[in-house]
Image (cartoon, grey):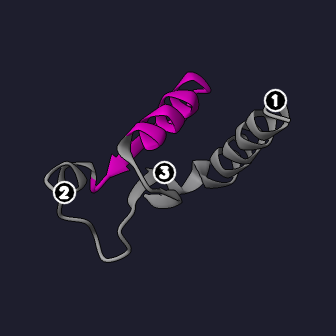
Amino acid sequence: MKVVKHYANAFAANLAKGMLENEGIAAAVLHQDQAFAGIYNKLGYIDLAVNDEDYSRALKLIEESESAASQSME
């Protein structure tokens, strides 16, 4: 697995995970339990990971999603 993005909170990471899964990409939220317990990984982030072969497509989908969200807020 490869980390596709770091998130500051579990909600955002799980939202992105759901979007990827809707596109047929298996994803996992890492360090979520530690964050809920108040113990963060060394970067202080929750990681979203996908299989290596899905990395490029997942990264593109996340970037497109974030771009669309920022444009709709303008």
Distance Cα–Cα, label 2 vs label 1 = 33 Å
Residue that appears at 63% across and 45% down? 58
Could you tell me residue 11's position as x and y percent? 40, 37
Check if residue 6 falls in the magenta segment: no
Q: Which of the two marks, 2 or 1, is nearer to us in this view?
A: 1
Residue that carries the numbered disc 2 in the rendered image: 34
Query: Is 5 positioned to the left or the right of 68 in the image?
Result: left
- Element marked by disc 3: loop
Could you tell me residue 12's position as x and y percent? 48, 40
Mark 3 Cα shell of 10 Å, populated few (<14), some (14-19), many (≥20): some
Q: Amino acid at mark 1?
A: Ser
Residue that appears at 44% across and 56% down? 8
Distance Cα–Cα, label 2 vs label 3 = 22 Å
Labelled disc at residue 51: 3
Whether label 1 touches label 3, CB < 8 Å: no
Residue that carries the numbered disc 1 in the rendered image: 72
Query: Is 10 positioned to the left or the right of 62 in the image?
Result: left
- Element marked by disc 2: helix
